Amino acid sequence: MLLKGVVVGSIASVPNAASAAGGPHGGKTKTDESDATAGDPKHTEPNDAEPNDIDESSLAVRIVDVPDALTGGEFLEWTLEVENLTSQPIEPAIDSFVDGESVGSVTLTIGPGETVQPTTPSVPTEPVETEESVTLRVSANGVADERTVRLLPAEELDAALQFPDPELTVQPGTTVHFEVGAVDPDATQTTTWFVDGEEVGSTLADPWQAVYFAEQDAHFWQETFDTPGPSEVVAAVDVDGEQFRASWTVTVDPKGLADPSIDAVRPEPGILEFDPEADEQTTLEIDVSDPDENLDRVVWWLTQADTILGVSDVSGATDTASLTVGDELCHTCVIIPWVITGDGTFASEPLWEAVDVSIDEPAGTATPDDQDVGTDDSTGDPTAPTPPEADAPSESSG
């Protein structure tokens, strides 16, 4: 129901909150990396106190400000006070939990009798269909405070803005491309994605999201499903502070939908030379197929520049997508087509590395993300492109 170990603007684990300021009351932040005296038996704090030698009577922990209720999808934020009840400096380790999951940890040095407000995480909540609750708990050296916050249902997103259909069955290993469309073109919209209750991604952390939203009027997520049975994908859509919810149920079954494929490529995958001063153009073509006969579109990406070069409409079981390129290419950038079906199944491969011939650098020496473009390492076949493990913003489910 909540983001597990993620702070605002990140899809990585929570960084130690000690990297932020100690709070309005001047609590000093300390980390192992920044304290050169840590572990030195000869080092003592003022008055020869050992700051970590504290017990439950040494401090008070108080959650002084937290909302009674939130709409699911909003960020859970709170204000915390930690008071040193002793006449010596102390260094409590402060841990924050939401529904038992760690969402942040910080160690502070607090002077004698001092009260500080340490920096606390901002935790996104999952939008819910019916009212639920979450439990916030903060503890430090055996002392804790706890609050319960109600989660109110978010408004359901207009079905016309949700892609693909809300229920689908796919074969094991199939990747699905999800989208939520723009609710208001004049508003600021962000989306956080959850799979089976766990946060997996956010538009705040991926530059391709902003590009896709600007050109395709939608935010996206791609997820690969392996585990048999149903999984729930939920999008928390924030539109200028108003919360919306979109959800999908994806069932994994051997008889379900399968991924589309890229079957042939022209010119052959690998190095694609271009001269920005020659006013020349090259036509790229890929033959694509869908075993479920529902091809929809091909989105052509240019890495490093974070640019969509174009979108080609395709249909049926087999089709050919083409794109003409010229001086909009950039040196060592890789062209990656996304093949998307009307069912939401998805395939993607890095095919060509653009090389500017006017630059005196050996071709193929600066491939982005250390990817081999147009070569399958296991076979050496130049017609079998390597999957875009680094560029495709997807996570494996199960």
Image: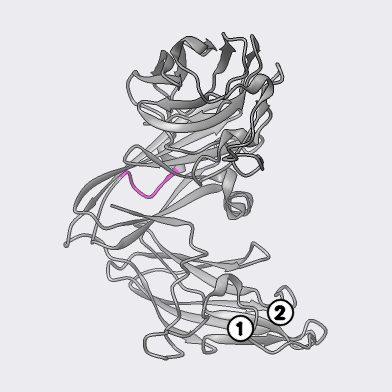
Mark carried by residue 326 = 2
Quadrant the N terminus occupies:
top left
The residue singled out by tag 1 in the image is 283
* Residue 267: image location, x then y, percent: 55, 89
Which residue corresponds to the image point at 33% horizontal and 72% vertical from the top-left? Answer: 317
Quick check: 167 above or below 4?
A: below
Towards the viewer: 140 or 306: 140
Amino acid type of the residue that numbered disc 2 sits on in the rendered structure: Gly
Disc 2 crowd, CA 10 A, few/some/many (<14, 14-19, 20+): some
Residue at the extreme right of the image, as rendered: 277
The magenta segment: 162-166
Quick check: 32 above or below 227?
A: above
Which residue corresponds to the image point at 72% horizontal and 73% vertical from the top-left? Answer: 328
* Residue 89: image location, x then y, percent: 62, 19
Which residue corresponds to the image point at 39% horizontal and 21% vertical from the top-left? Answer: 153
Q: Is residue 360 left or right of residue 94?
A: right
Which residue corresponds to the image point at 65% horizontal and 26% vertical from the top-left? Answer: 45
